[in-house]
Amino acid sequence: MVFSSLFFVFFFLVVCYGAYFCAKKMKTRNIILLVSSLIFYAWGGPALVLLLCLMTFICWIGALMIEQNTIPKLRLALCWITAVICIAILFIYKYAGFTISVAYSIFNISSAIPSIALPIGISFYTFQLISYVIDVYRGEVEAQKRYWLLLLYASLFHQCIAGPIVRYADVNEDINNRVVKVDEVGKGISRFAIGLAKKAILANGCGVITDAIFNKNGVMMNAEGIASLSSAAILLASLCYMLQLYLDFSAYSDMAIGMGLMVGFHYKENFNYPYIAHSATDFWRRWHMSLSSFFRDYVYIPLGGNRVSIPRHILNMFCVWALTGIWHGANWNYILWGLYWFLFLVLEKYVIKPKKDPKLLPRIVGIALTLVVTFFSTMLFKFNDLSALGQAVANIFTSNGNGFSDISTNLTFKNNIFFLLAAILACTPIIPAISSLCQKNKTAEKIHTVIGTVMPAVLIIISALALAGDSYNPFLYFQF
């Protein structure tokens, strides 16, 4: 089940929140959310709910034992043991197949590689549970005494499947003592509607263009197939994928934040218009902020951060970005993607040294260069086949004898030019800026209020029409 499905929007969410608002006591409301979340998660594989419950139980017991012990070394050992168990489970499900395939290739073994089903969202809830255990060890939060409330935190259907990675410290008060406010319900509905439209209309539309160019018979082309494409075709497909990646994932975060607000949960922002970043460092302050902050607080700073020698600092950055790449997937392209960003971040830190708040012209140049860096990083993200990736990059710069463009690509671009402009506009803060300006004029503010009241319903209706007539509706980050 995905947020952008008609069943979820018009049945699951209506039934869940209908029952929620009919209940009066907080305990009853929490039970309704927990049952709904487990049903939601079980939709992708009933047996995998047991794994989520098991990992939560391990962290629940581990955190309680840490809190009850006063011996520093024993507390540290318990923290490590709990975290390692969670990481080991994540490794088995997500990386065992990749590790075995690498070993087979090194030792020239031809046996079949065992197939292990990847539990949906395991990377997200594993990191949430690990952060909870570490925060209990650090004394930043108290251990949750009720297992089912910790399970509610780990399984909340708003964010369990694809983030944002929510810290227990950020929602502990909401779990126990949240208050539903009328204005926040309205903001939540509006935020959900925006995310739904961003996903159903824009992200899906970009994905259709990308797949129409890169896929053949529903399968991603190999290097030979990519070699037949023109430079313009690869540029257009990669641009659409770059747009799709942001619109898809930020839409999920928008909907998660919106659904949380409707019932009194306050999740932190996960994106801040990363495609207007003026440097690689600025980009990672804006993109998937919950993941960046996790690695900063639980890997980078414990390793020493930047308060160490230059070689050690570079090593710390290498560890963080290698882990970031590995977190995204069990394939070489994700590892290379992490190291790619590591390279540019090191260059910025010690060679380029861009200003934190540059003036207009340097900022524009910085945005353009950062977009180029990001463009090729998303190509790394897209191509699991490194030979196909190499061929795609080569085609961009050499045309490979195909010419820069072709009739099919020209027609696709012309037919979708206004759609692409709308998708690009949605990646910028222009619309929020216009909205903010409208509130400074009384007449414009009245018009803005009317539009703001009607727009959520309009967006949900348009999104529903788009979903009803289109079978293409993936969520890219489900694979993580």
Image: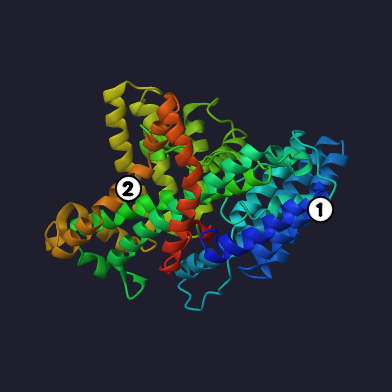
Crowd tier of the residue under label 1, counting other residues whose Cα lies within 10 Å: few below 14, some 14–19, many 20 or above: some
Residue 9 falls left or right of residue 149? left
Taking the spot 73% from the left edge, 57% from the top edge, the residue there is 19
Q: State the image coordinates of residue 416 (x, y, percent, origin top left).
A: 26, 56
User: Is the C-beta separation of discs 1 and 2 under 8 Å?
Assistant: no
Q: Is residue 132 visible?
A: yes
Front-lying residue, 189 or 293: 189
Front-lying residue, 342 or 201: 201
Residue 186 falls left or right of residue 248? right
Front-lying residue, 429 or 402: 429
Q: State the image coordinates of residue 375 (x, y, percent, origin top left).
A: 32, 47
Residue at the farthest bottom position: 111
For the N terminus, the image quarter is bottom right
Per the image, the residue denoted by label 1 is 28
Q: Is residue 59 visible?
A: no
Per the image, the residue denoted by label 2 is 422
Taking the spot 52% from the left edge, 28% from the top edge, the residue there is 306
Question: In the image, what residue type sits under mark 1?
Answer: Thr
Q: State the image coordinates of residue 132 (x, y, percent, origin top left).
A: 71, 43
Q: State the image coordinates of residue 262 (x, y, percent, origin top left).
A: 64, 46
Front-lying residue, 149 or 29: 29
Query: Which numbered disc flags the more N-terminal residue, 1 or 2?
Result: 1
Q: CA distance from mark 1 to mark 2?
A: 43 Å
Question: In the image, what residue type sits under mark 2?
Answer: Ala
Residue 341 falls left or right of residue 266? left
The answer to which quarter of the image holds residue 463 is bottom left
Taking the spot 67% from the left edge, 70% from the top edge, the residue there is 46
Picture layout, residue 194 above or below residue 49: above
Tag 2 secondary structure:
helix
